[in-house]
Amino acid sequence: FLDVFVFGITLYTILTFMTLVSIIVFLEMCVYIYKKVPYPKKTNIVWVIGAAPVISTMCCLGLWIPRATLFTDMTSNSYFAIVIYKFLILLFEECGGEEAFLRYSEKKTIKVSTGPCCCCCPCLPPVSITRRLLFLLKLGSLQYAILKTVFSIFSIALWANGNFDVSTLSIYGTALWINLFVGVLTIIGLWPIGIMFMHVRDSLRPLKIMPKYAMYQLVFVLSQLQAAIINILAVNGVIACSPPFSSVARGSTFSQQLMIVELFVITLVTRMLYRRIYEPVNLDPHENDNEMNVKIRLCPNSVEEHTA
């Protein structure tokens, strides 16, 4: 028993230390970005790079205060819902802003048969890039940021009244229907980012947009899909109970421990990707019909490489 106790304390101490390091790295990045990057781009970057540290912090709180797991999970999910919208806006900012993007792309088309909604529908015709289209793209991600937060608050209210239990997947339970509806909202919220990313990924390659997008997607997979899979396994008894902890409680603890380690690594990688300064973006309209040509020149004197 003593060995198990010592191992548990050591493990929790290491995970807490990793969380604190993630917070310190995030704060250091915030100071750097607010000094070096112009507004409003810096605000969107701070929101995006804060995804891993914020979720890691919530996981750490859930470890030390197991009864608060519902609140920490809802907070993490609501924050990441906002990050999805902010990442879409950041894609526009990387192109020089919405006006610059529209000015040089209004007579061009954009492919909408992308994931997660329409990746199986290659027959969908390209859509002209207009101000109305950009509004619909932003609206698609914004609705998820708003409604996810609303449903999180609603779920907490139902839980306080005894009508919401994440371990109950019955068709008569509220948790199943709320999660299904939020799942549909999630797919709709991710679709605009997939459309925009597929359109600008080659043009923004010098800005390392591919690994940035990969980190954003990885945080989504770990915080949403991985946690959901572990929760389903726990509910179905695949993860054994260990008194006084139930299967669901052990599943939540395992998910939180795993995510803290994973998000710690993502935080360090994110620092390397975002901690640099770029020259303003110049758009050249005289290129092929379906692709925006973004000429981005990295100034050697203005780029500050990652320092340990």
Image (cartoon, rainbow, N blue to C red):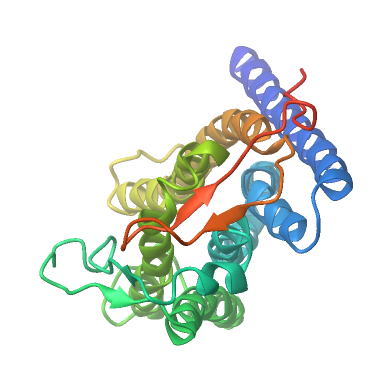
Q: Is residue 245 visible?
A: no
Left or right, 153 with reference to 64: left
Left or right, 182 with reference to 6: left
Which residue is farthest top?
Answer: 3
x, y percent for residue 208? 53, 37
Q: Residue at x 36, y 70 (%)?
A: 183
Q: Name the residue nearer the viewer: 232 or 28.
A: 28
Instruction: Work out whether 207 lies above or below 150.
Output: above
Instruction: Work out whether 132 lies above or below 76.
Output: below
Q: Name the residue nearer the viewer: 290 or 165.
A: 290
x, y percent for residue 133? 42, 81
Quarter of the image where one finds residue 64: top right
Quarter of the image where one finds residue 189: bottom left
Q: Is residue 149 visible?
A: yes
Left or right, 90 with reference to 190: right
Q: How many marks?
A: 0
Instruction: Work out whether 153 lies above or below 271.
Output: below
Q: Name the residue nearer the viewer: 3 or 159.
A: 159
Q: Residue at x 51, y 33 (%)?
A: 258
Q: Residue at x 60, y 29 (%)?
A: 269
x, y percent for residue 114? 27, 62
Q: Residue at x 36, y 48 (%)?
A: 234
x, y percent for residue 273? 62, 34
Q: Looking at the figure, which quarter contains the C terminus?
A: top right
Q: Name the residue nearer the viewer: 161 or 76.
A: 76
Q: Looking at the figure, which quarter contains the N terminus?
A: top right
Which residue is farthest left?
Answer: 123
